[in-house]
């Protein structure tokens, strides 16, 4: 089977899995029966995280047994394989636990260390964002592209503020707060990146964020025309990320005092 056919089949599998896991999440969310596995400082682990992940991983074990997996709940194995799936079965977990309807499934597929396929599915709005490397970005099959906001003072930026005390993204974004139109903290990195891709946001920044929150969304944003950077972190699977529209990326990078020359592309190490 040639490379393009593998990619086409994996895109179909990725989109189907995102929808299937998303349907499970929506049913659980609408039932109100949201069970907590355990609580951590600034975070929570839900039965729904595991339930969504089980749906995805069971199908991948059946249909892609030779591929590796990096997933938020079950961790990582076989990450040196040619094909590696990078999964956040429920991005926006704390939102979900509060009944706040802003969460998604995020599934990326890496080949030889490059993210080649990404799908982010929001089951509440029934919006499936997806992309393939060099194939463009789509929402429910319609081509999407970043906004054309001309100036920073007309821009709406998202910042992710995670679980680690002292994360810098919020303080970094304070440097820009007075220069942009508005800042937003949504609680889902994957949806922030999908919204950048379809023009609902002009940029997203977060540090010490996991690769499973970023893999699919950053591909979708880049394929929609965004400029995206990722930096290494001291902790395995954590990164820092900045993505923005082409018109504003340079000004935002400078404004956040980030150094794009030290950006990295690594996902599976
Ligand atoms: C979330 C990220 C978000 C971050 C949250 C959390 P989760 O992922 O998408 O950007 O700020 O702290 O990490 O934990 O809901 O899958």
Image (cartoon, helix red, strand yellow):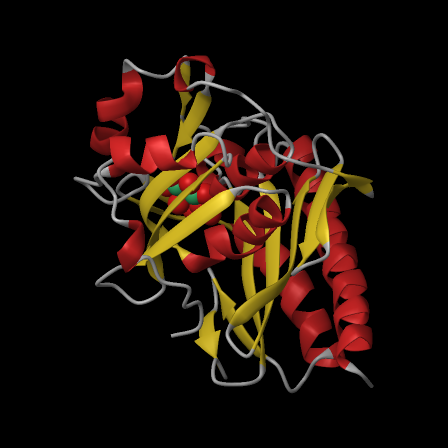
Is residue 250 placed above or below 66 in the rendered structure?
above
Residue 116 spot, x, y in % from top left:
63, 65
Q: Does residue 251 appear to the left or right of 228 in the view shown? A: left
Residue closest to the eye, 103 or 98: 103
Picture residue at 27% right of the left edge, 58% below the top: 262
Name the residue nearer the viewer: 6 or 19: 6
The quadrant of the image that shows the N terminus is bottom right
- Compared to residue 42, the image places residue 151 above or below, namely above
Residue at 73% x, 71% y is 59
Hey, which residue is sitting farthest left in the picture? 166
| Ligand number 1: quarter of image | top left
Vertical placement of 254 versus 264: above or below? Answer: above
Q: Quadrant of residue 140?
A: top right
Residue under the image location 33 percent in, 57 percent down: 263
Q: Position of residue 266 (x, y in %)?
A: 41, 68
* Count of marks, rendered view: 0
Position of the C terminus, as image quadrant, is bottom left
User: Vertically, is 96 above or below 201?
Assistant: below
- Visible residue check, residue 37: no
In the drawing, does residue 84 fall left or right of residue 23?
Answer: left
Name the image quarter holding residue 181: top left
- Residue found at x 26% / y 42%: 41
Residue 54 makes an appearance in the image = yes
Residue 174 on image: x %, y %: 23, 23
Residue 43: x, y in percent?
35, 42
């Amino acid at each position: 089977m040639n490379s393009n056919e593998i990619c086409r089949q994996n895109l179909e599998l990725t989109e189907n899995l995102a929808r299937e896991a998303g349907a499970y999440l929506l049913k659980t969310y609408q039932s109100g029966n949201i069970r907590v596995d355990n609580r951590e400082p600034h975070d929570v682990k839900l039965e729904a995280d595991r339930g969504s992940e089980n749906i995805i991983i069971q199908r991948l074990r059946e249909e892609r047994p030779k591929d590796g997996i990096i997933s938020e709940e079950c961790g990582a194995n076989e990450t040196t394989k040619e094909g590696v799936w990078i999964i956040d079965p429920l991005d926006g977990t704390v939102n979900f636990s509060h009944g706040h309807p802003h969460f998604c499934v995020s599934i990326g597929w890496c080949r030889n260390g490059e993210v080649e396929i990404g799908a982010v599915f929001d089951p509440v709005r029934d919006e499936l964002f997806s992309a393939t490397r060099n194939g463009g970005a789509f929402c429910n099959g319609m081509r999407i592209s970043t906004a054309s906001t001309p100036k920073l003072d007309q821009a709406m930026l998202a910042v992710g503020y995670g679980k680690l005390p002292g994360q810098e993204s919020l303080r970094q974004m304070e440097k820009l707060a007075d220069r942009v139109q508005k800042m937003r903290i949504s609680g889902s990195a994957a949806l922030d990146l999908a919204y950048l891709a379809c023009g609902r946001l002009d940029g997203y920044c977060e540090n010490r964020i996991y690769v499973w929150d970023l893999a699919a969304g950053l591909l979708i944003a880049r394929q929609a025309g965004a400029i995206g950077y990722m930096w290494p972190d001291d902790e395995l699977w954590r990164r820092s990320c900045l993505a923005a529209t082409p018109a504003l990326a340079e000004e935002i990078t400078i404004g956040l005092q980030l150094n794009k020359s030290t950006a990295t592309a690594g996902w599976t190490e």
